Image: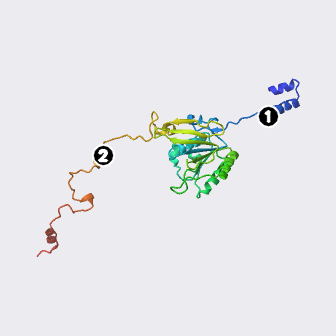
Amino acid sequence: MSAAEQRVGAGQGTGSVVEQLRERIRQLQAAPRRYLAVLRTGLSAVDALLPTGGLPLGQVVELCGEAASGRTSLALHAVAAAHQEARLCAWVDGPRELYSPSAAALGVDLERLLIVRPQASEQRIWAAVQLARSGAFACVVLDLTRGMNPGGRACRVALAEARKLADAAARGGGLLLLLTSPESPADGVVRLRTEARDGDGWSVEVVRSRQGGTGARAELPWSALYPALGLEGGGRLLDVAEDTEDGTPDFLRDQSGALRNGLGILGQRPGRDAPMPPMRQGLDAALPAH
């Protein structure tokens, strides 16, 4: 017999138990609640910059930085973190530069990633809004770093479009990541700026945050962002070992004193460089004997 049934049998009627349950439900509904829904990137130094301990779900987060500053790789880390929880993600690839093997090397499950490549620039915002509003994706990445054409400028988000993106993220409950450049920033609730530090590493700074933490900055080695590189002690991403010796195998070297083989240069002129047989022998063989 359960504890509830024992209390009922001890003198409390069923109606009294139901009333107690209703009162308890009312107390829980009236109590202040705080939802902590974040997506952690797996980089503890980056997650610690934000008061929520990660990238907040249901909001627009902007990753702003120059090319090769780590902004795309940081977004891929967030996508990989969502895939570890068996969630789906989407990537609106405006510049058409997402390289799937590199994404897989950072832990992205390509079977759980929907890559959308719109045919026109105006379709990028629309696609991101529809994906985020659907609620089917834990993270939607919108790459606005460059235009649709090679060498095109970054796409600037209008205020009305920024409101649509924020509304879609709030309705869908997922994270909407905007990849932007410093000359064309967007209007994300949270803005993180990424910078490369002359090959020694990269840094992340909180430029905007409504939850606090503005101005917080973290400097990390490249090995934290690209563990597959195996850079010990942080390392330099652009270090190249200097080797003065020529690694060409000996059998591929041209021998300056090599004799001609009778086939000419590279064998393309047969008989040109070899002595030819006397023509008299051929004529004697062709003439009839008298």
Q: Spatial distance from mark 2 to mark 1, Cα to Cα?
A: 79 Å
Q: Position of residue 51 (x, y in %)?
A: 63, 35
Which numbered marker is on residue 144? none
| Colouring convention used in this rendered image of the protein | rainbow
Q: Which residue is mark 1?
A: 30
Residue 75 appears in which quarter of the rendering? top right
Q: Position of residue 5 (x, y in %)?
A: 83, 27
Query: Where, quadrant-wise, is the N terminus in this rendering?
Result: top right
Tell me the element at label 2.
loop
Q: Nearer the viewer, residue 177 or 187?
A: 187
Left or right of residue 121, residue 67 in this image: left
Residue at 30 percent of width and 46 percent of height: 249
Residue at 65 percent of width and 52 percent of height: 161
Q: Nearer the viewer, residue 87 or 33?
A: 33
Query: Where, quadrant-wise, is the C terminus in this rendering?
Result: bottom left
**Foreground mark, 2 or 1?**
1
Q: Earlier in the sequence, mark 2 or mark 1?
A: 1
Tell me the element at label 1.
helix
- Looking at this view, name the residue that lies furthest to the left: 290
Q: Position of residue 47 (x, y in %)?
A: 59, 36
Mark 2 belongs to which amino acid?
Pro
Q: Which residue is mark 2?
A: 249
Q: Could you classify mark 1 by the number of other residues whose Cα lies within 10 Å: few (under 14), some (14-19), or many (20 or more)?
A: few
Whether residue 29 is visible, yes or no, is: yes
Q: Nearer the viewer, residue 279 or 88?
A: 88
Mark 1 belongs to which amino acid?
Ala
